[in-house]
Image (cartoon, rainbow, N blue to C red):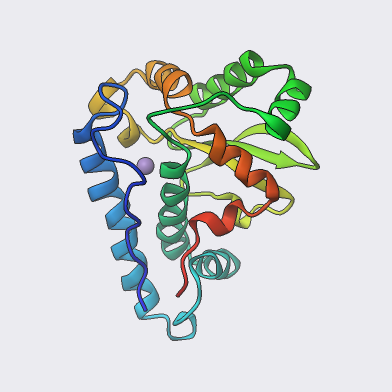
Amino acid sequence: MTFTLPPLPYAADAFGDTLSAESFSFHHGKHHKAYVDKTNELVGVTVDLAGASLSEVIRAASDRGNRVLFNNAAQLWNHSFFWQCLTPDPVKPSGKLAGLIDDFGGQDALVSALKQEAVGHFASGWAWLVLDGGALKVTSLHDADSPVVQDGIKPLLTIDVWEHAYYIDYRNARPSYLDALLAKAINWDFVAQNLDGEGIARADQAG
Ligand code: MN3
């Protein structure tokens, strides 16, 4: 078995100017695909990881200090999770998620905290909304680092802040990219699903 590039859960032109089809063609079709191909190549020469799931490969690479395999496999997972965090037809949070957002300080406070974390993250990485001890927490992780190897936090939402995520549509303007995504493209239904603590499985793949 080899890992595959998960298809986008929407048409590549579904977001209009917010995220262009050209942007998806590079970000999904080239960047994400390169992480898939490189992970397969590296797992192919690591005999005892044959048949391991993607999350198992990520954890094993982290444990062994195999940075090249970790970076590629974690980026495969991070992007597979990220696409599901976006939707061209966002609906407002409701139910249990709305209650947790109220506890956080409200929707405006949450969006503001996510933007601040994402804009303030130095260089490449990912902004995250996670469940930590039953409460919402905004954080960020550097480069390919992933909640798959972070004990105690459950991934709910991520936003890619690597420059390749926004340079085609927003050039260097990371704050404009954040404003657009947070206002027009967050899949709060997916965030709500991940409150079950099973978010890692939603971007995993069998080996
Ligand atoms: Mn990316």
Q: Nearer the viewer, residue 138 or 93?
A: 93
Where on the image, by quarter, is ligand 1?
top left
Q: Is residue 48 above or below residue 93?
A: below
Q: Nearer the viewer, residue 144 or 15?
A: 15
Q: Which quadrant would residue 82 be assigned to in this image?
A: top left
Q: Is residue 40 above or below residue 87?
A: below
Q: In the drawing, does residue 36 fall left or right of residue 100?
A: left
Q: Which quadrant would residue 83 be assigned to in this image?
A: top left
Q: Which quadrant would residue 84 be assigned to in this image?
A: top left
Residue drawn at the location 48% of the way across and 22% of the way down: 182
Q: Is residue 171 visible?
A: no
Residue drawn at the location 42% of the way across and 80% of the way down: 46
Residue drawn at the location 26% of the way across and 21% of the way down: 17
Q: In the drawing, does residue 32 fall left or right of residue 192?
A: left
x and y percent of residue 140 in the render?
Answer: 58, 36
Quarter of the picture containing the N terminus is bottom left
